[in-house]
């Protein structure tokens, strides 16, 4: 293994590689795919899936990029959700997706952290408890995939994250830069993009009341209940005291207060009500990571018939599991709840300082946010941006934004502004899942972020 496929093959099938230490990085040619497991620590296995774009454009002045997509949760599968429901070549009905990000870049999906999706641990003690631990494991995965593959090393890697994935993205980027400086990792980091990312839980918690009041889902009383009173304030205190686990428990309480007082607003899109039935959660369900299940089932619940066409669970534990030759006893999503629970002590920890560190190092950081999102509301994102210590902040804030359009339509799809290496996109008409709800503008944006030679739309 580890040799290029020399015959002309449109699809490469690599069996999971379990033999000692790090898995050999499989290689693939354009329009092909490769996948495998990396044993990141003894008995802890991470699954990855790389698609080489068939749309690759050779431009001597611009290398073809690779996007590493990081899903949130914690415990939601990028290999399943990001790939089949958001940006991969096929949708959950296994039909071609015309807005796939392969049009702009190669795509690397990883079931991160261990225990997510097809990734698994053989011992309960091996789940990660912090974002940094996740970042270290992901760096090991990148070493396994990139270090032996000179052609991959020519492509800059862009880490694009959604939701909780943003916290992994910034810790990974810093860990990867350290590994690159130490000569342990051979790749070029192109940049980091944080889509509707949970970078500052406190700022999001305080955004919910005012946002939902402005859009008429709460009245003054309800708004006061969310912000001035009790729960949000208590969360802030717990965070200040470093009582992060207590803050996570309070966050669950606050979410349920929000639901009740807004008559069940959909926390991923304030124009909608949350799915009938699935929103009536009990305290026990909450403590068992229902928040995660809600997140990972969300897109399916909008589109699919459970157990039928478009059901990702069914797909990932059926034909896709078979195609990838995943070990029989590994269930996609089987350990996801534990992933969430083990990270509960880090869940409410902010990662603003890590964003600052990346900005100070000159790394391109893009932040994009869907207008209709509640859980990672634009209001909360703007609040944490204003807390950056980065020297360019005041110039960034003072700049005017530019409107975005897409295709032949002259209707405004969003706005963007940049100052030096900080870039911001407001995406209109999208909730939490930007590439799903505004695929055209998301695709153009990702072309610009990655400086893809296929970017000119
Ligand atoms: C892409 O597919 C969607 C439906 O899956 C369709 O609504 C849209 O018009 C298509 N876009 C293009 C550019 O073909
Ligand atoms: C699957 O079986 C293998 C071999 O018996 C074992 O090492 C591994 O821990 C099992 N995996 C899971 C997720 O149960
Ligand atoms: C606000 O909180 C009070 C006290 O907990 C409660 O009685 C009231 O129903 C809440 N109002 C709304 C609109 O949520
Ligand atoms: C950051 O992105 C801009 C384009 O937006 C590009 O010109 C610049 O070279 C990038 N910087 C780095 C360090 O990659």
Image (cartoon, rainbow, N blue to C red):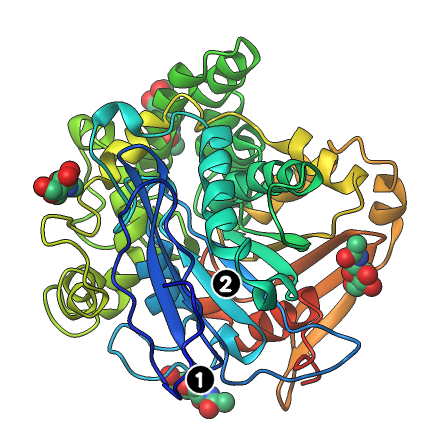
In the image, the residue with mark 1 has its CB under 8 Å from the nearest atom of ligand 1:
yes
* Visible residue check, residue 369: no
Quarter of the image where the C terminus is located: bottom right
Q: Is residue 342 above or below residue 391?
A: above
Ligand 3 occupies quarter: top left
Q: Crowdedness of circle 1 by 10 Å Cα count: few (<14), some, many (20+)?
A: some
Taking the spot 20% from the left edge, 37% from the top edge, the residue there is 281
Q: Return the residue at label 2.
A: 434
Residues at marks 1 and 2, CA–CA distance in whole angstroms:
15 Å
Residue 374 in percent (x, y) is at 47, 47
- The picture quadrant where one finds residue 401 is bottom right
**Residue at the (42%, 63%) spot, across then down:** 2
> 193 or 380, which is in the foreground?
193
Q: Position of residue 95 (x, y in %)?
A: 30, 83
Which residue is under mark 1? 98
Expressed as whole percent of the image width and height from the top left, the position of residue 140 reads 47, 42
Residue at (73, 82) in percent of width and height? 59
The disc at residue 365 is none
Q: Quadrant of residue 251?
A: top left
Element under disc 1: loop
Of label 1 and label 2, which has the lower sequence position? 1
How far across and how far down the image is residue 119, in percent? 28, 46
């Amino acid at each position: 293994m580890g040799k290029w496929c020399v015959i002309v093959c449109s699809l490469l099938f690599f069996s999971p590689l379990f033999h000692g230490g790090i898995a050999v990085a499989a290689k693939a040619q354009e329009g092909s795919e490769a996948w495998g497991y990396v044993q990141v620590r003894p008995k802890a296995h991470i699954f990855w899936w790389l698609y080489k774009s068939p749309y690759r454009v050779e431009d001597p002045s611009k290398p073809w990029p690779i996007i590493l997509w990081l899903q949130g949760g914690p415990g939601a599968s990028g290999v399943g959700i990001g790939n089949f429901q958001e940006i991969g070549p096929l949708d959950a009905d296994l039909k071609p997706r015309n807005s796939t990000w392969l049009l702009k870049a190669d795509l690397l999906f990883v079931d991160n952290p261990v225990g997510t999706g097809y990734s698994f641990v053989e011992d309960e003690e091996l789940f990660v408890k912090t974002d940094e631990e996740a970042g270290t494991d992901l760096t090991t995965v990148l070493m396994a995939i990139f270090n032996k593959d000179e052609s991959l090393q020519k492509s800059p890697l862009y880490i694009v994250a959604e939701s909780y994935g943003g916290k992994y993205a910034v810790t990974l980027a810093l860990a990867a830069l350290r590994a690159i400086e130490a000569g342990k990792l051979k790749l070029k980091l192109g940049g980091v993009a944080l889509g509707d990312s949970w970078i500052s839980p406190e700022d999001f918690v305080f955004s919910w009341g005012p946002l939902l009041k402005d859009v008429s889902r709460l009245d003054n009383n309800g708004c006061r209940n969310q912000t001035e009173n009790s729960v949000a304030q208590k969360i802030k205190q717990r965070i200040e005291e470093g009582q992060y686990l207590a803050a996570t428990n309070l966050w669950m309480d606050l979410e349920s207060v929000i639901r009740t007082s807004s008559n069940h607003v959909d926390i991923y899109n304030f124009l909608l009500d949350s799915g009938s039935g699935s929103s009536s959660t009990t305290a026990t369900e909450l403590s068992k990571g229902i928040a995660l299940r809600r997140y990972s089932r969300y897109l399916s619940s909008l589109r699919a018939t459970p157990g039928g066409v478009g059901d990702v669970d069914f797909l990932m534990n059926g034909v896709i599991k078979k195609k990838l030759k995943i070990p029989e006893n590994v269930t996609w999503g089987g350990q996801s709840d534990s992933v969430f629970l083990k990270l509960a002590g880090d869940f409410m920890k902010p990662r603003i300082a890590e964003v600052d560190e990346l900005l100070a190092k000159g790394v391109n950081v893009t932040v994009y946010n869907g207008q209709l999102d509640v859980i990672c509301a634009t209001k909360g994102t703007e609040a944490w941006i204003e807390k950056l210590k980065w020297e360019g902040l005041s110039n960034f804030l003072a700049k005017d934004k530019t409107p975005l359009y897409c295709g032949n339509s002259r209707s405004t799809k969003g706005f963007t502004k940049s100052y030096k290496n900080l870039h911001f996109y407001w995406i209109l008409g999208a909730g939490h899942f930007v590439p799903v709800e505004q695929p055209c503008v998301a695709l153009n944006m990702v072309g610009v972020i990655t400086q893809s030679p296929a970017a000119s739309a």
